[in-house]
Image (spheres, rainbow, N blue to C red):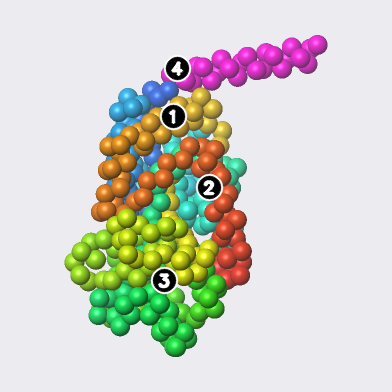
Amino acid sequence: MRSLKSLCIGGLLTILVNASWAQSYPSQPIKLIQPFAPGAASEVALRIVAERLSIALKTTVLIENRPGAGSTLGADSVAKAAPDGYTLAASYNSSISPGPLMYSKIPYDPIKDFQHIALIGVYPQYLIVRTDHPAKTIQDFLSTVRAKPGTVNYASAGVGTSGFLVAELLKQTLSLQMTHIPYKGPAQAITDLLGGRLDMVLTASATELVKAGKVRVLAVTSEKRVPLYPDIPTLEELAPGVQAVSWVGISAPAQTPKAITTRLEKEILAVLNTPEMQARLSEPALGLFPLTLGSDKFLEFIHKEMRTWSPVIKAGNIRVD
């Protein structure tokens, strides 16, 4: 009887604490930790979402850049932050999945140390070459790779990024030999591509270059063709299973009260699902494809990413530390 009574009291206290959190939250500004330096493509989308979320929550949602260690530094700071709903993470594939799978040791658990609240959207990668490149199609490019194994080079924004991983998957699937040249970001890689020092670049930032007539898109890494380039094939069409996207979502420390994460999920989804916001986030200049998922579906998405990339990472013996 005492045990049952204790359970009842404990359950009642939990309900009362959650109710208290729900009524008082938020009472101060919220920090959204962006684990990259200012200027990342995703930051524009995050600022748009933060602005609308500030209105919905009647408080200020501030973007705080905390770059380092391939985005894991910022993620770790949120994993260890007070679980009070006032420090959230802009979570990415590089910090949650598959990024952590490529480290021999990482200071947080990407599943156990977070409550993943909502997915905002995905960024497909574009396989681009100079407009004067002899390859007019992706088939032409692959024929060149097969004819000159190991001599064709390509760049990504770094080992472990989506561009690098999809190229690795393509190489494994089609038994290709290409030389990877890692960069710390897309800007210098594109400069070297235009300067003739690279054969191909995988990047999420292609729209303005295409408009300027400087590059040609040969393929896109998303599951389906993108509306912006309806005539450009996906790598999936050439080699089933070869696809990869970068993604961005919002997560909280693991022990954040349920009342707070439920409130955040509700408000974030309400902000994301308006026609105005969908149109804004879909603007070509952002490069984002809105994919709104709540906490349960978001967690399923993360687990699927882990299942997809774990064997690829093992087969390629890919390490970033």
> Can you see residue 30?
no
Residue of label 3:
182
Residue 214, x across and y down, in percent? 22, 71
- Mark with earlier residue (2, 3): 3
Camera-nearest label, 2 or 3: 2
The residue that disc 2 covers is 301
How far apart are the alpha carbons under marks 1 and 4?
A: 15 Å
Quadrant of the rendered structure where residue 12 is? top right
Q: Identify the magenta region.
A: 1-24
| SS at mark 4 in the image | helix
Residue 64 placement: quadrant? top left
Q: Pointer 3: residues within 10 angstroms few (<14), some, or many (20+)? A: some
Q: Is residue 15 magenta?
A: yes
Amino acid type at image mark 3? Pro
Q: CA distance from mark 3 to mark 4?
A: 49 Å
Q: Is residue 27 above or below residue 111?
A: above
Q: Amino acid at mark 2?
A: Phe
CB under 8 Å between callouts 1 and 4? Answer: no
Q: Which mark is residue 23?
A: 4
Q: Give me the C-alpha separation between circle 4 and circle 2.
A: 31 Å
Q: Earlier in the sequence, mark 1 or mark 4?
A: 4
Residue linked to disc 1: 266
Q: Which of the image's four quarters has the N terminus?
A: top right
Label 2 neighbourhood size at 10 Å, few (<14), some (14-19), many (20+)? some
Locate residue 160, reporting x and y percent. 48, 63
Residue ID at (41%, 71%): 182
Q: CA distance from mark 2 to mark 1?
A: 19 Å
